[in-house]
Amino acid sequence: MTQNVVLGMDVGGTNCRIGLITEDLQVLEFEIFPTEKVFSKDLNASINISSFIKAYLLRNLKDMNLLAVSIGFPSTISRDKKTVIQTPNIKNISDNFAAVDLLEKELNCTVYANKDTNNLLLYDMNELDINDYQDVCGIYFGTGVGNAVMINGKILTGHNGVASELGHLPVYGNSNKCTCGNIGCLETLISGLALVQLRNANFPQTELNEIFLKKSKTPEVCKFIKGMAQTVALQANIFDPECIILGGGLLMDGYFPFSDFEREIHASTRKPYPEKNMLLKYSHPTQINGVIGAGIYAYKRLKDVNYR
Ligand SMILES: [Zn+2]
């Protein structure tokens, strides 16, 4: 019998990851490429992505049956999930990129687009075996602060499709300029980018990957951890979720001070609830998470035409 698969692609600021996902969520023919190689400067985004996918399929699809192509973008996506509105970290994806319509024409195949963190949340819920939870928040402390929110079993999209931009909450008194163009966004204070600046300003002699190992008790790093924790408490206080999933590159550092972080989360969360029942779970980041998440999203849409 012919094997059904969907193509899952995870477009990142640094790398693009791609694979074929079976119906039981196994990933086949996983590949990873530097994003700057996928997005050549002379071509538009739909030509870049479609030629990349066509070449991949030629190498790997063989006799399998492709049901759909599903792509996670580090971007804001329109409510109808057709247009990639803004992608601050990839220069070659211009604003209001009509990804689904253009790529469906190029590839002659059903195409789905989703915000990468929404795909990550779907992956993590499956991986952590909490698919039956209805109210879940995912916070991903990476280069920026990624976020996805599920309410009553549905991922929150918002009126324009751009809900859950936690990293771009304005912070009172903060005058740092953000990559999104605004002044004062949260992720200018607590993110991978902000940690680089904290290191450059305060500990230029310390390697970035040794900041948590050597400097975690300094006032600067304690304040940084407290800011991350307050961000988690903020989501807990707004949504009172069954579970908050925490992930992203900053937490992968072997010396990240988890006990200080969790203590500060509890300190800043409203008492007695949601603090008393707060459930924190950690994502296990690997290269394939976003690719499988894109696959899960595609299978949900293939099963239910109204799913977005
Ligand atoms: Zn911003």
Image (spheres, rainbow, N blue to C red):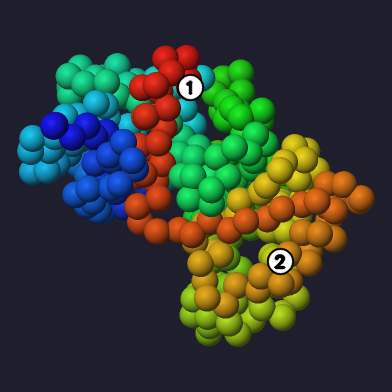
Label 2: which secondary element: helix
Nearer the N terminus, badge 1 or badge 2? 2
Disc on res. 74? none
Q: Is mark 2 within 8 Å of ligand 1?
A: no
Residue type marked 1: Arg
Residue 47 visible somewhere in the drawing: no
The quadrant in which residue 45 appears is top left
* Figure check: 169 above or below 276: above
Judged from the image, the secondary structure of the residue bearing numbered disc 1 is loop
In the image, taking residue 12 as reference, residue 169 lies left or right, namely right
Left or right, 199 with respect to 225, comes to left
Q: Position of residue 135 (x, y in %)?
A: 67, 36
In the rendered image, the residue lying farthest to the right is 272
Alpha-carbon distance for marks 1 and 2?
Answer: 34 Å
The residue singled out by tag 1 in the image is: 308
Percent of width and height locating residue 289 = 40, 50
Query: Tag 2: residue type?
Result: Phe
Where does the N terminus fall, quadrant-wise?
top left
Q: Is residue 168 left or right of residue 120?
A: right
Viewer-nearest residue: 43 or 132? 132
Query: Residue 261, which numbered label?
Result: 2
Does any portion of residue 22 appear in the rendered image?
A: yes
Number of numbered labels in the structure image:
2
Residue drawn 60% across the image and 72% down it: 256
Q: Residue furthest front?
A: 1
Residue at 14% x, 31% y: name it.
Answer: 2
Q: Residues within 10 Å of mark 1 (few under 14, many from 20)?
A: some
Q: Residue at x 17, y 19 (%)?
A: 108
Mark 2 burial class by Cα count in 10 Å: few <14, some 14-19, many 20+? many
Quadrant for residue 44, please give it: top left
